Image: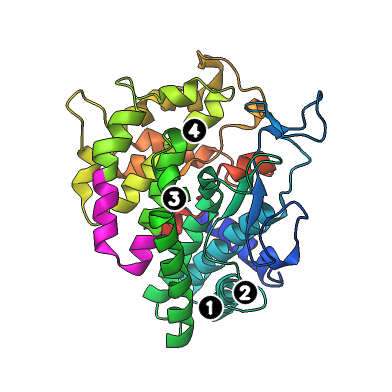
């Protein structure tokens, strides 16, 4: 499934991370955060000081990222999402416990150690100066925990964890899953629309699979069939709400990855989900067919170019691999193999939450 050269990529990264010390939310704090040391904090990407009222509430510039935002917690979580999956993938390849031990060090620092753990909620994410101390829309920030949760599941399935560590780590994800499915912020994100609703569903499904919560997994399947697919997709396979953004190419790719990954995860127990179509013919295959030509040759993209980072897309989108395998489309897999697996631009990393497909099979 995963080519030999990709295994080499995994081991190279994992060896690099063997000496990396954990960095959690407690390593930095913003004076603008309404939360405490253990609370994740971030600020809305596209919100800027108002030139006419510099000390007043921020104003929005869609697609234009404010470089003065507090991003330390986001960076720390993305770092975690690169380190732990690479180490666990290396453990899966080699069976060498040094990789699992190092992964566990980071997992316990983030989710168990009283001195460094993150609180299992997102009350202070995507804050906006002068407007909000946190928003439901901020739940998309923990999309980078999806592959961390998957890596933890692999450690459990391989029998590596002792009972205390396993129960402690699962308890954090149980509390966070409960929060994001019951708190008003979580409900807001679920019902937000566009890539946010799909990202909420991928997180819920990933954490529910880790916790063996079959009821929540079935909720996600129904949410996909009855809400996400019919409401988000046009009959041509595009996502109109993403095409209307100032970064339509990047948002289409991101939303495609999230929705296809959601189907891949939910179809592990119900493979027929790959074949599901709405009454008017919308299907997960349609979005892959829509984007494939524009990934293969970006020059054919018929919509406006993104206002930022257009030159940095595409990358090795997991949707091409997941869809190529499930739908028997070798050309998707070949294209996936040809693309950059480890983008260095932070904005691309922010929208690229699944980097180790080995863990997903």
The residue that disc 1 covers is 96
Task: Give the numbered dot on residue 109.
Answer: 2
**Which of 56/79 is in front?**
56
- Which label lies toward us, 4 or 1? 4
Give above or below for 223 relative to 30.
above
Q: Is residue 345 above or below residue 40?
A: above
Mark sitting earlier along the chain (1/2) = 1
Q: Give the labeled residue for mark 3.
A: 184
| Label 3 Cα neighbours within 10 Å, binned few <14 / some 14-19 / many ≥20 | few
What kind of element bears circle 2?
helix
Mark 3 secondary-structure assignment: helix
The numbered mark, 4 or 2, whose residue comes first in the sequence reads 2
Is 179 placed above or below 307 here? below
Nearer the camera: disc 1 or disc 2: 2
Residue identified by numbered label 4: 253
Q: Main secondary structure of the magenta part?
A: helix
Specify which label sits upstream in the sequence, 4 or 1. Answer: 1
In the rendered structure, which segment of residues is drawn in magenta? Answer: 207-222
In the image: residue 229, left or right of residue 43 = left
Residue shown at the point (68%, 56%) measured from the top left: 34
Relative image position of residue 171 (x, y in whole percent)? 44, 74
Q: CA distance from mark 4 to mark 2?
A: 32 Å
Kindly indicate the quadrant of the structure image that contains residue 61: top right
Nearest to the observer: residue 134 or residue 2: 134
Foreground pick, 113 / 295: 113
Alpha carbon of mark 3 to alpha carbon of mark 2: how far? 28 Å
Label 4 sits on a secondary structure element that is: helix
Q: Residue furthest bottom?
A: 163
Q: Where, quadrant-wise, is the C terminus in this rendering? A: bottom left
Q: Of tags 3 and 2, which is closer to the observer? A: 3
Instruction: Tell how many labels.
Output: 4
């Amino acid at each position: 499934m995963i080519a030999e050269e990709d295994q080499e990529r995994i081991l190279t990264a994992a060896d690099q991370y063997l000496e990396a010390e954990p960095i959690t939310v407690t390593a930095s704090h913003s004076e603008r955060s309404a939360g405490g040391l253990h609370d994740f904090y971030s600020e809305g990407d596209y919100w800027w000081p108002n030139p006419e009222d510099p000390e007043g509430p921020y104003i929005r510039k869609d697609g234009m990222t404010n470089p003065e935002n507090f991003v330390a917690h986001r960076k720390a979580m993305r770092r975690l999402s690169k380190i732990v999956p690479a180490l666990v993938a290396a453990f899966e390849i080699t069976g060498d416990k040094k990789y699992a031990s190092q992964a566990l060090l980071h997992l316990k620092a983030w989710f168990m150690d009283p001195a460094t753990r993150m609180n299992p909620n997102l009350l202070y994410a995507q804050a906006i100066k002068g407007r909000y101390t946190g928003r439901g829309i901020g739940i998309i920030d923990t999309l980078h925990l999806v592959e961390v949760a998957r890596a933890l599941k692999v450690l459990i399935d391989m029998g590596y964890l002792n009972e205390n560590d396993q129960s402690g780590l699962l308890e954090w994800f149980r509390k966070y899953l409960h929060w994001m499915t019951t708190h008003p912020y979580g409900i807001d994100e679920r019902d937000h629309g566009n890539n946010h609703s799909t990202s909420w569903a991928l997180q819920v499904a990933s954490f529910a699979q880790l916790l063996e919560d079959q009821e929540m997994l079935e909720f996600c399947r129904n949410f996909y069939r009855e809400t996400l697919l019919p409401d988000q997709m046009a009959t041509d396979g595009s996502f109109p709400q993403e095409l209307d953004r100032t970064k339509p190419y990047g948002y289409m790719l991101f939303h495609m990855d999230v929705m296809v990954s959601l189907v891949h995860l939910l179809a592990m127990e119900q493979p027929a989900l790959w074949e599901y179509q709405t009454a008017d013919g919308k299907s997960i295959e349609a979005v892959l067919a829509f984007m494939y030509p524009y990934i293969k040759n970006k020059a054919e993209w018929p919509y406006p170019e993104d206002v930022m980072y257009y030159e940095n897309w595409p990358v090795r989108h997991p949707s091409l691999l997941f869809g190529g395998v499930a739908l028997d489309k070798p050309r998707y897999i070949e294209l996936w193999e040809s693309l950059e697996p480890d983008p260095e631009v932070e904005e691309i990393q922010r929208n690229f939450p699944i980097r180790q497909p080995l863990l997903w099979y």
